[in-house]
Image (spheres, rainbow, N blue to C red):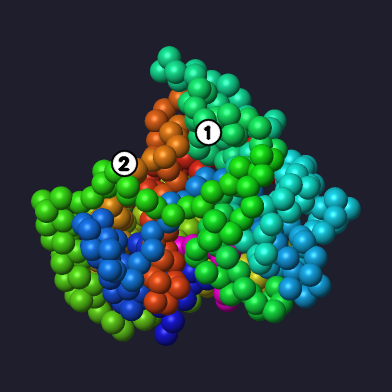
Amino acid sequence: MKRFKTILSEAKLTHLEHIEDAIFDDGIAGGKEALRILKDVADVLHGHANKPLNIQAKVDGAPAVVAGINPENGKFFVGTKAVFNRNPKVNYTNADVDKNHGGGLALKLKSALKHFPKMGIKGILQGDFMFTPEDLKKATIDDEDYITFTPNTITYAIPAKSELADTIKKAKVGVIWHTTYTGDTIADLSAQFKININALKKSKDCWFTDTTFRNVSGAATLTLGEMAIINKRLVSAEKELSALDKKSVDLLFGKTEIAFNLKIYINDLVKQGKRFKGKQQAITGFIDFLRKRYSPMIAKLKSDKGKAKKQSSLDDLINTLHKNKKAGGTLAYALQWHDDIADIKRILVKKMETVNSIPAFIKTPTGYKVTGPEGFVAIDTLSNKAVKLVDRLEFSRNNFNAVKSWS
């Protein structure tokens, strides 16, 4: 079994999974891998730089942008993740952009098509679009003047009198790169979670950087006491994982309908800013969620046969959960493990958030509220597998409920 096999679609960076969801995706093997990566992240923050781990800060840009030289024809192109579709949307000209995209997204891609070549991109890069000139605003936050841009959910604020603000005001596009691709065809590209930022040419029209997490100030270094607390929590999570019934885990998780719906259920809780309230209540809540989710699906079906088939699928799911609950509560304990891993992750994320090179805010009806960055990505440099570390109760909830101005 490939470790974290659901994180990457083939070799392209199309989706990153939350580390606590590893048990739903890959069962006990995924759970063990999640624990190992969390331990490595803690060790790196404790000062052990020899760990096979690379940590990158996630940025809240939009849209995701892929750009570079198509190895099949030598032409420069830009696009979104749709570049990796079965029928890829690759844009070489403004006419291609108009054919493949619309609205604000098309305008962003046309700006990229005009200005990205000035960076001298040799291969293919993926990153987050941060701004064009019309996105830059002036704001006063806590009596200090800033230049701000809000590509997605988070508002990034640059002190107005800084050298960085002067650079950004002159730029025609802003982008933060995080992934390099190599290969002979777009279909066969292989991703590397790193950028040689020094290989790119500087241009006053292009503001760019990478996502490497740099703990230069030492602010994110774990103390002995903090490390002891994290290790204790990790040991407890290991015991919870070893107590799970393997047969039940294999029945419930992996490529199953229960696992698929569980992740939707968790996202639904995140949108509401909620967490599980005890193991057994979590199961009851999940069953209620299934009924509410399947009910409109069943009602929309036109034939009695179709409705009966969908109802039977729902009944099978609920019966499996009830049997599992009687057999030892594997799902309940897995949900508890999920929450415990999320707690450990949250401790590490909060520590890393103390290193925040660009102040970040969430705009509210009453003004700006300080927030952390979107989160972080932990990359195992030996396997080149990555998983995201995000405070779902803060950032993910904001992201789910945000209006995307660029869409």
Q: Which residue is mark 2?
A: 354
Precedes in sequence: disc 2 or disc 1: 1
Helix, strand, or loop for circle 2?
loop
Indicate the quadrant where residue 217 lies: top left
Q: Which residue is mark 1?
A: 164
Q: Nearer the viewer, residue 201 or 97?
A: 201
Horizontal side of 67 relative to 145 (left or right) equals right
* Rendered view: 36 above or below 134: below
Name the front one of labels 2 and 1: 1
Residue 40, x across and y down, in percent: 27, 66
Question: Mark 1: few, some, or many residues within 10 Å (few <14, many ≥20)?
Answer: few
Name the quadrant of the C terminus. top right
Magenta span of residues? 10-17
Horizontal side of 368 relative to 185 (left or right) equals left
Residue 369, x across and y down, in percent: 42, 28
**Disc 2 to disc 1, C-alpha distance:** 20 Å
Indicate the quadrant where residue 33 lies: bottom left
Residue 274 visible (yes or no): no
Residue 276, x across and y down, in percent: 31, 52
* Rendered view: 166 above or below 85: above
Looking at numbered disc 2 in the image, what kind of residue is underneath it? Thr
Q: Residue at x 72, y 50 (%)?
A: 118
Main secondary structure of the magenta stretch? loop
Please, which residue is most extreme toward the right here?
95
Q: Residue at x 50, y 65 (%)?
A: 193
Q: Residue at x 28, y 63 (%)?
A: 49
Question: Mark 2: few, some, or many residues within 10 Å (few <14, many ≥20)?
Answer: some
Helix, strand, or loop for circle 1?
helix
Q: Residue at x 23, y 72 (%)?
A: 241
Q: Which mark is residue 195?
A: none
Looking at numbered disc 1 in the image, what kind of residue is underneath it? Leu
Please, which residue is most extreme toward the top here?
143
